[in-house]
Image (cartoon, coloured by chain):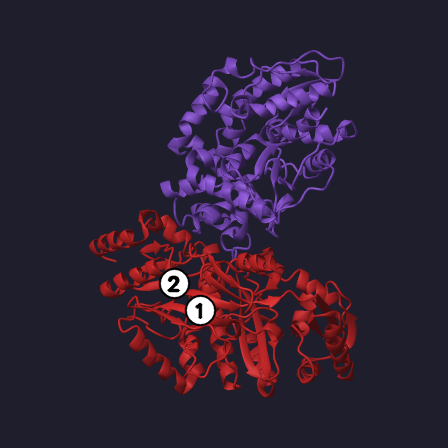
């Protein structure tokens, strides 16, 4: 950015948020550029630099966000909104510089409506702080992504995130009832918090998953649930993916578990077999049930009946409970995943049951062709289908080869997914890592998104380059 | 002390972590920025080691925006001790002459007056009255903060130990060196340390007792790691009282009592049960725990130079800790550290009472 423009911009932003809440210092732009995209992390380890903003701005209110956007829009400065900085797709990297609009100071709980079981919060509240706060009142948010300690509500909503118990509680698009968003021109729009409505299209859904490309999410009204009397676990080993998936499909015709995870033979060998005596090649199904003991008796016994009829071997609560208790462990770096130019990632695809198995085998074959270890689990399962975590890992002799291999695995993995009728992300979002695949995934509907973008952000300042929108020369 | 050869691999891993500990970092709480966070500090040092970016003035400031509370370590599966790593880098920065100017007066005061406040050394203990007793002879190492700023701690400790029949010796102590060690001034700290070791070893005492966890850690751990040996056992008052728990009485104390774990006593020295057991004996009931307690306790904000360099942020952290105590309905916060007592009392207002452990135990004497 031209230094004169930067000075002028800085002065105007300082007058909005105060000098202590905006920084142009390179050290701060470096330290605040850190997201959780595996490619960013690998590059950091390799000593490479990430794209930097010119200014990092920390607003405290919706009004300040609106004023900052008015200035940015007038001066045509790119704005990259950042929540917890826990995104795994590079969605918060300020690839065209400009303003990094960091919402971490907007972390207040504004209202708890006990009658309606709703909570209204500023979007910068961190997930675990929110969960602990509602726990004190006997509620749970029902939203438990692995990033819970780092990600925040704005990020949840901007990426359509999902928690490990989404089979029962739903994803953030199901949990969000009302939304406040600031558009590129600084106008503030609010959608009413109602359980259902029939007044035209549900416009809040336009911003849920918009990844900062259409506006900045500043407040949300979210559903809460009573903390369940009991969370119970059960585990079953299946001889193959097919029989495990058949059992899952059948279970959802009768009951709704909170947790459903089917590990393929490689993932079972990696994360289950070192703690439990699982036969080689078996696939572990982990189930969880939230409810009263009587409700869980019913859900569990029906699930067990289905599993046993499909060839399942009963492993009791062990593997599922262990996973739950150690669910954050895999998110930490370790010597294997950070050695040399190691890089891994997850393509969290989603498909209906009729396509799911085909997508799995096609992606696995395509990804394994690039010197990658691929292990997968089917999780976030629903009545009509579910997600697969296609996890890959590769380690190459140098950075250039590693980053190129990483890209080829993504390219071919996503191509296989789309070819077999899947959708390329269930909960991680698009960001930068999948931006070039967006049009291919959405097909003809992408043009609608492009037109909406043009109307809401005609100058293209909002998070350019993400979600397949606003790539600049 | 950390093995310097391990630092490159540890900061490499920490700097690219998806922030699994940031939610408990008190300086993240205070600044709400990714700069003063464990991974921010690791990234600065990692980039310096890799040659990506050199540490500039702002980077140095960020390294001094660390309380060294080690709360991040509780949440770190790979067990990377950023507090130790930061302290190691601070030591190098001091040698390079690149430490923050705000620390200069602290260091000069300790060197000249043997306390960080610049108070006269002869006023350190001339006000403390002890009377000879026939019981076990112990040295009471008060530490600077209790000697000059939190005198009630010294008064109640002396009264208490006296009532238990101990023959108390107040040594001609200098600053233990903790504020200097934690901010990187090793040579100046060791000058203080050598005096203390000489004085303490010259005393005919069976045990050295201190009420300050900062002093406790330094006397028990840092001196030894720098090759300085104390001849007598060092105990924190909470441990010392726990061994005499049968002799302690129960006082009439109304309301809910919670305990704030000092970082230097808990996470740094693994002393969690002793103060709780003493409180339970004195109050006649179990401590009402805050949500974040023991190795997950939030720092009070008053450590490693933070209050000196960034007073408003330090107070914000202390204020949050008081809020956490109020969240569990506590009427009283007991701690076992003059720094914590000082900070928490400054933020408690009229709504909650803050006492150090010897002050609480001394209440049993008032009932008599």
Q: Which residue, given by chain and number where applicable, does mark 2 sit on?
A: A81
User: Please, which chain is the residue tagged with disc 2 on?
Assistant: A
The percent position of residue A170, horizontal first and vertical second, equals 57, 74
Q: Observer-nearest residue: B337 or B333?
A: B333
Q: Are marks 2 and 1 in contact (CB under 8 Å)?
A: yes
Crowding at dot 2, Cα within 10 Å, few <14 / some 14-19 / many 20+, comes out as many
Quadrant of the rendering where the C terminus of chain B is positioned:
top right
Q: Circle 1: is it few (<14), some (14-19), or many (20+) Cα within 10 Å? A: many
Position of B300 relative to A287 (above/below): above
Q: Earlier in the sequence, mark 2 or mark 1?
A: 2
- In what element is the residue under mark 1? helix
Colour of chain B as rendered: purple
Q: Which residue is mark 1?
A: A158
Q: Is residue A60 visible?
A: yes
- Do tags 2 and 1 sit on the same chain? yes
Indicate whether A134 appears above or below A195. above
Does residue A441 appear to the left or right of A313 in the view shown?
left
Residue at 78% in and 71% down: A315
């Amino acid at each position: 950015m031209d230094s004169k423009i930067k000075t002028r911009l800085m002065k105007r932003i300082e007058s909005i948020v105060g000098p202590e809440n905006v920084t142009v210092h390179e050290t701060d732009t470096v330290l605040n550029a850190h997201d959780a995209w595996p490619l960013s992390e690998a590059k950091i380890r390799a000593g490479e630099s990430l794209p930097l903003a010119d200014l990092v701005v920390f607003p405290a209110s919706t009004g300040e966000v609106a004023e900052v956007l008015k200035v940015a829009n007038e001066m045509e400065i790119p704005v990259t909104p950042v929540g917890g900085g826990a995104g795994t797709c590079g969605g918060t990297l300020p690839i065209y510089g400009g303003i990094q609009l960091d919402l971490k100071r907007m972390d207040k709980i504004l209202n708890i409506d006990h009658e309606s079981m709703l909570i209204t919060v500023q979007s910068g509240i961190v997930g675990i702080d929110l969960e602990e706060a509602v726990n004190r009142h006997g509620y749970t948010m029902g939203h438990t992504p692995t990033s819970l300690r780092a990600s925040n509500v704005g990020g949840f909503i901007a990426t359509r995130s999902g928690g490990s118990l989404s089979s029962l509680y739903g994803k953030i698009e199901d949990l969000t009832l009302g939304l406040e968003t600031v558009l590129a021109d600084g106008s503030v729009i609010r959608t009413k918090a109602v359980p259902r409505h029939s007044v035209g299209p549900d416009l809040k859904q336009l911003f849920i998953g918009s990844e900062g490309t259409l506006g900045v999410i500043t407040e949300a009204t979210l559903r809460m649930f009573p903390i369940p009397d009991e969370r119970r676990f059960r585990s079953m080993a299946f001889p193959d993916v097919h029989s495990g998936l058949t059992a899952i499909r059948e279970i959802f015709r009768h009951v709704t578990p909170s947790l459903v995870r089917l590990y393929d033979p490689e993932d079972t060998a990696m994360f289950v077999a070192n703690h439990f005596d699982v036969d080689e090649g078996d696939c572990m199904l982990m189930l969880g049930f939230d409810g009263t003991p009587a409700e869980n008796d019913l859900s569990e016994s029906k699930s067990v009946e289905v599993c046993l009829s499909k060839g399942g071997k009963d492993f009791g609560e062990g593997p599922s409970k262990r996973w739950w208790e150690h669910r954050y462990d895999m998110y930490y770096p370790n010597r294997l995943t950070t050695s040399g130019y190691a890089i891994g990632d997850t393509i969290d695809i989603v498909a209906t049951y009729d396509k799911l198995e085909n997508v799995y085998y096609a992606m696995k074959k395509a990804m394994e062709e690039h010197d990658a270890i691929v292990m997968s689990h089917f999780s976030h399962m629903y009545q009509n289908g579910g997600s697969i975590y296609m996890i890959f890992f590769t380690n190459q002799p140098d950075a250039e080869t590693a980053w190129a291999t990483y890209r080829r695995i993504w390219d071919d993995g996503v191509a296989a997914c789309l070819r077999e009728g899947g959708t390329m992300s269930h909960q991680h979002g698009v960001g930068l890592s999948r931006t070039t695949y967006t049009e291919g995934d959405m097909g003809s509907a992408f043009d609608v998104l492009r037109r909406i973008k043009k109307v809401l952000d005609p100058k293209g300042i909002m998070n350019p380059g993400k979600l397949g929108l606003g790539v600049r020369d | 002390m950390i093995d310097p050869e391990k630092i490159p691999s540890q900061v490499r891993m920490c700097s690219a972590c998806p922030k699994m500990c940031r939610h408990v970092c008190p300086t993240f709480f205070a600044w709400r920025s990714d700069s003063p966070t464990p991974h921010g500090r690791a990234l600065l040092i990692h980039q310096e080691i890799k040659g990506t970016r050199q540490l500039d003035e702002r980077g140095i400031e960020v390294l001094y925006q660390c309380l060294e509370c080690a709360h991040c370590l509780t949440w770190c599966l790979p067990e990377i001790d950023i507090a130790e790593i930061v302290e190691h880098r601070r030591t190098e920065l001091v040698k390079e002459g690149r430490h923050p100017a705000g620390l200069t007066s602290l260091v000069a005061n300790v060197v000249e007056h043997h306390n960080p406040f610049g108070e006269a050394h002869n006023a350190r203990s001339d006000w403390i009255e002890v009377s000879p007793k026939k019981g076990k002879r112990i040295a009471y190492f008060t530490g600077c903060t209790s000697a000059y700023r939190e005198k009630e701690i010294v008064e109640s400790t002396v009264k208490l130990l006296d009532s238990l029949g101990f023959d108390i010796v107040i040594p001609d102590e200098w600053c233990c060196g903790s504020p200097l060690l934690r901010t990187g001034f090793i040579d100046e700290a060791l000058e203080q340390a050598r005096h203390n070791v000489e004085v303490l070893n010259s005393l005919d005492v069976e045990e050295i007792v201190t009420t300050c966890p900062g002093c406790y850690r330094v006397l028990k751990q840092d001196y030894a790691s720098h090759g300085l040996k104390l001849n007598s056992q060092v105990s924190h008052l909470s441990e010392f009282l726990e061994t005499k728990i049968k002799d302690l009485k129960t006082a009439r104390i109304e309301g809910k009592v919670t305990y704030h774990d000092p970082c230097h006593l808990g996470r740094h020295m693994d002393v969690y049960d002793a103060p709780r057991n003493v409180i339970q004996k004195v109050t006649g009931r179990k401590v009402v725990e805050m949500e974040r307690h023991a190795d997950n306790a939030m720092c009070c904000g008053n450590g490693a130079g933070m209050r000196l360099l960034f007073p408003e942020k330090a107070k914000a952290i202390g204020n949050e800790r008081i809020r956490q105590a109020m969240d569990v309905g506590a009427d009283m916060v007991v701690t076992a550290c003059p720094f914590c007592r000082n900070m928490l009392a400054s933020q408690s207002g009229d709504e909650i009472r803050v006492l150090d452990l010897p002050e609480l135990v001394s209440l049993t004497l008032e009932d008599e």
